[in-house]
Amino acid sequence: MNKDEIIALDSEYIAHTYGRLNLVPEKGKGSTLFDKDGKKYIDFTSGIGVNSLGIAPQSWITAVTEQLSKIQHISNYYYSEPTAKLAKTLVTESGMKYAIFQNCGAEANEAAIKVARKYSFDKYGEGRHTIITLVNSFHGRTITTLAATGQDVFHNYFFPFTEGFKYVSANDIDALKSALDGSVCAVMCEAVQGEGGVNILDSEYVSALAKICGEKDILLIFDEVQTGIGRTGKLFAHTHFDCKPDIVTLAKGLGAGLPIGCCLIGEKCADVLHPGDHGTTFGGNPAVCAGANVVLDTVLSDGFLDSVNEKGEYIKSKVLSFGLDCVKEVRGKGLMIGIQVTVSHKETVKKALEKGLMLLTAGKDVIRMLPPLNISYGEIDEGLEILRAVLSTAE
Ligand SMILES: *Cc1c(COP(=O)(O)O)cnc(C)c1O
């Protein structure tokens, strides 16, 4: 099929729930991909932070296909070696107690919310169920995780939403304190808000938040669905701060392109869920976990996270060196970078795509970059040259 035929087929048969951009990717390698017509694109998106090792990484393909040829799925009634190994690495590296596997970020957050509420129910009884989240957060698309998301635009149409969420402005410790009534069981936040605009939490805020949560036995949940697994230059983004979360959720980059979610639970809530309290058919799939083991081996290998930080700093300073008037701020950690612009972020993304660069937006006015963690400097330079050309002609 040619490009137009694929687009026509898609439009006829797939519900129109996305504003798709004009690209039909066919194949690729690393951070470079090609469309149906052989046109080349540099990928600064990783499929929204998912393809952490780029397109078609060989070691990951080998691990996944070897597992597929042995056994592709077993139910959670049985044991699985790659799944147990993955849990060991995640638990050891995070200092948490157990892993709960899911299929995506929203599900990982659902598990976190269930654990937090049951922890409080078991210990304090009914009524202590409120979860505080931050304004401009994003936690997923299920009814409950939409309710958890601190953006009014997500709270339409689908009423009734799950009760028991309250939103406070990020980096405002007084606002948090006044929201902490006796009904609160947990606070959930992103170390760096992804969808909300690449907004980094203040260190003092996180320290104060962690301290208050500890004192009041309120669980601290970090949604690391986007920031986790090396994206910000550390394996877990909360380790940029002085805090010890009780629950950490993961998804996007963990599977390198296959669907996986994970809710890591700490000592405090280790014994909250018992057989029958929670479950999933697909979560912890052995082939997906075999691939995720390769992701962790790679990200934890010598010098890998240093290179993520170096590339991130290189990108930020290079964008600043363009000296463009339309660039208001360049911020981020590791390879999670936002460029706040005074021109239309959506138009910039469209124009860059025409010229062969894939970018994301975030918030109202931010161009977001989440390139594969192993992107080469050559690919970075090629992509940034396109970005410079597009931004210098933007108005
Ligand atoms: C993407 C994202 C989610 C939702 O993940 P899905 O896999 O789409 O369900 C939740 N939280 C954060 C921070 C995200 O970036």
Image (cartoon, grey):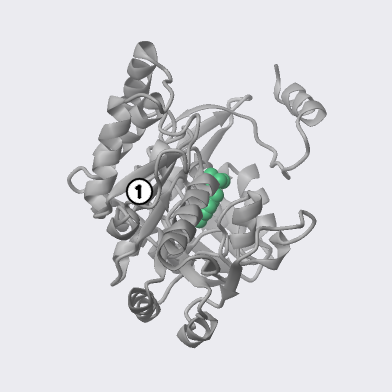
- Identified at 24% across, 42% down, the residue is 89
As drawn, the residue found furthest toward the front would be 125
Residue 83 at least partly seen: yes
As drawn, the residue found furthest toward the left would be 302
Observer-nearest residue: 63 or 24?
63
- Identified at 31% across, 66% down, the residue is 240
Q: Is residue 110 left or right of residue 292?
A: right
Please determine whether, in this image, residue 134 is positioned above or below residue 32: below
- Identified at 56% across, 64% down, the residue is 137
Find residue 299 and report its horizontal and vertical position in percent. 28, 44
Please determine whether, in this image, residue 375 is positioned above or below residue 330: above
As drawn, the residue found furthest toward the top would be 69
Q: Quadrant of residue 36?
A: top right
Q: In which quadrant is the C terminus drawn? A: bottom right
Observer-nearest residue: 229 or 76?
76
Find residue 306 and report its horizontal and vertical position in percent. 24, 54
Q: In which quadrant is the N terminus drawn? A: top right
Observer-nearest residue: 30 or 268?
268
Amino acid type at circle 1 is Ile
Find residue 98 and report its horizontal and vertical position in percent. 31, 47
Q: Which residue is mark 1?
A: 229
**Helix, strand, or loop for circle 1?**
loop
Q: Is residue 92 left or right of residue 363?
A: left
**Number of on-image labels:** 1
